[in-house]
Image (spheres, helix red, strand yellow):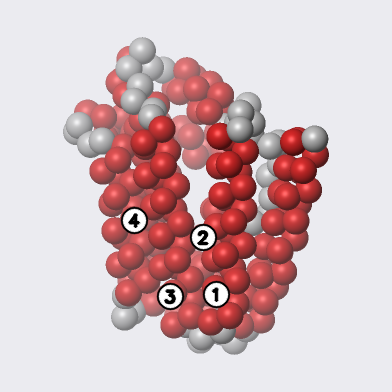
Amino acid sequence: MKGNSISEREFKERWSELHGGADTEGVVGGWLSFSYQAARVCVALRISPNLLTLLGLGTAIAMGLSEYAAIALLLLVISLFFDGIDGSVAILRGTESKWGELLDSLADRISEAFWLYMGWRLGIPAWVVITMWTIASTQEYARARLASLGHREIGVVTPTERPVRAIFMAFALLFYIFDIPGTVQLSYAFLALLTFSFIKVMRTASQVLR
């Protein structure tokens, strides 16, 4: 079934299937219900998933280049919205594709580079920013490589998944907007958490491939 003919229950089942049987209750279920309704509007307006991906990338780039922290925060939220519903639109339209997955993955990596560029502009040391991006990108590459080897999911959710990385960036912006000290210390703590997450993913990947 395609388009608006797919029910919310069927949408959630398909989403769960694409995410290795992930739970669709609680907060995730609430987001998926919202995403389903937003995606229906996009389908009705004939907005393609790839266009939403590119809109998310464009707003992320604008966020990284913004001269105003408050506007950057708003652009971050808008970018995450576009990024969050592109896959939902693909499910409703029945147009999930390898090209769409690749485009989405590339857009995510570029977007996060601009997030962290903004972080550097807020005062986070360059070496921390570069290390954060490298760890996050390598972790996501490892997951994608495992998928190409036939392991769709590796059965581990880390404390620094992409939404959490976005929350870190939002806090950095809020600290700057309200002149709250501690942005650099926050970045050190998050870098440590990223490192822990990376080790967790690699250990799990090693077990899966044995």
Q: Mark 2 highlights which residue?
A: 166
Assess disc 1: are there few (<14), some (14-19) or many (≥20) residues with their C-alpha within 10 Å of its C-alpha: many
Which of pointers 2 and 4 indicates the residue nearer the eye?
4
Q: Position of residue 96 (x, y in %)?
A: 39, 28
Give coordinates of residue 184: x percent, y percent. Answer: 61, 82
Classify the position of the C terminus by image quarter.
Answer: top right
Distance from disc 2 to disc 4, alpha carbons, whole Å, reads 14 Å
Mark 2 vs 3, N-terminal side: 3
* Residue 190 appears in view: yes
Instruction: Determine if residue 26 is in view.
Output: no
For residue 125, what is the image quadrant? Answer: bottom right
Question: Which label was assigned to residue 129?
Answer: 1
Q: Amino acid at mark 4?
A: Leu
Residue 65 lies left or right of residue 179; in this view the side is left
Relative to 52, residue 64 above or below:
below
Query: Upstream in the sequence, badge 2 or badge 4?
Result: 4
Report the residue marked by disc 3. 118
The local secondary structure at tag 3 comes to helix
Q: Disc 2 vs disc 1: which is toward the camera?
A: 1
Give the labeled residue for mark 4.
57
Residue visible at 30% across and 40% down? 50
Indicate which disc, 2 or 1, sits on the residue closer to the N terminus: 1
Q: Quadrant of the N terminus?
A: top left
Mark 3 → mark 1, Cα distance in angstroms: 10 Å
- Mark in front: 3 vs 1: 1
Question: Image point 60% across, 71% down: which residue?
Answer: 131
| Amino acid residing under circle 1 | Val
Above or below residue 7? Residue 28 is below
From mark 2 to mark 3, how far is it between C-alphas?
A: 12 Å
Q: Earlier in the sequence, mark 4 or mark 3?
A: 4
**Of pointers 3 and 1, the one earlier in the residue sequence:** 3
